[in-house]
Amino acid sequence: MPTTYRKTAKGQAEIETRQYRLNPRLRTALILVDGHRSDTDLRRMIFGEADETLRTLLDEGFIEPIADRRSSGAPTTVSPAINSAPAPFGGTAPAPFGSSTPAPFASSTPQPLAETQVLTGKAFEQFRRDAIRSFTDTVGPMAEALAIKMEKARSHDDLRPLLGLAMNIILNTRGAKVAGDFSARFLQ
């Protein structure tokens, strides 16, 4: 069963302050962990040794498992323990992170933000989270630098110019249709 991971307080601190000085590969993977993506989804987005990367983040306390997706799609709390399988030469090898079949997850499509509408509190946080997720899903690891800036935005006025940059990056990497879809969701 796929498992969903979220950042721990230590993981959040690394994103906000670079306190633990993770190497770029681990930091990029940490940014992709959002509490919604399953390990299967993350494996497709992380370059190189995705299982090793996730295991390192888990072992060092930057992420934690929160749920696996049952056939009903309802999240169920899981233990953070990871099973290890015997490896050759008497050591232990990491067990694979979940199954190989992707699990569907619920995604809410945010309504476009009207020019006069001001988001505050939890509504702004959700809007910002949705924008970052859409951007990173669309662009992948090269979205890291701008995604970090977007995470630091504390108001819609701070976020709006960053959304414009994100839309331009999407336009240059994925084309006008995808950029238009992003713009319709987050810049209107």
Image (tube, rainbow, N blue to C red):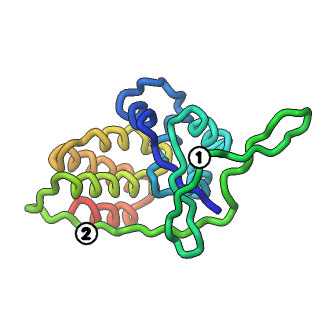
* Residue ID at (42%, 60%): 175
Q: Quadrant of residue 60?
A: top right
Residue 69 % position (x, y): 56, 65
What number is the disc on residue 99? none
Type of amino acid under label 2: Gln
For disc 1, the marked residue is: 80
Q: Quadrant of residue 41?
A: bottom right
Residue 151 % position (x, y): 32, 42
Q: Quadrant of residue 51?
A: top right
Of residues 111 and 82, the one drawn nearer to the viewer in this rendering = 82
Q: Residue furthest left?
A: 116
* Residue ID at (21%, 50%): 160
Report the quarter where the N terminus lies. bottom right
**Closer mark to the observer between disc 1 and disc 2:** 1
Decide if residue 62 is on the left or right side of residue 18. Answer: right
Name the element at disc 1: loop
Q: Which of the two discs, 1 and 2, labels the residue nearer the N terminus?
A: 1
For label 2, the crowd category at 10 Å Cα-Cα, with few meaning under 14, some 14 to 19 and many 20 or more, is few
Of residues 134 and 34, the one drawn nearer to the viewer in this rendering = 34
Report the quarter where the C terminus lies. bottom left
Type of amino acid under label 1: Pro
Q: Are marks 1 and 2 in contact (CB under 8 Å)?
A: no
* Residue ID at (29%, 56%): 126
For disc 2, the marked residue is: 111
For label 1, the crowd category at 10 Å Cα-Cα, with few meaning under 14, some 14 to 19 and many 20 or more, is some
Quick check: 69 above or below 146?
below
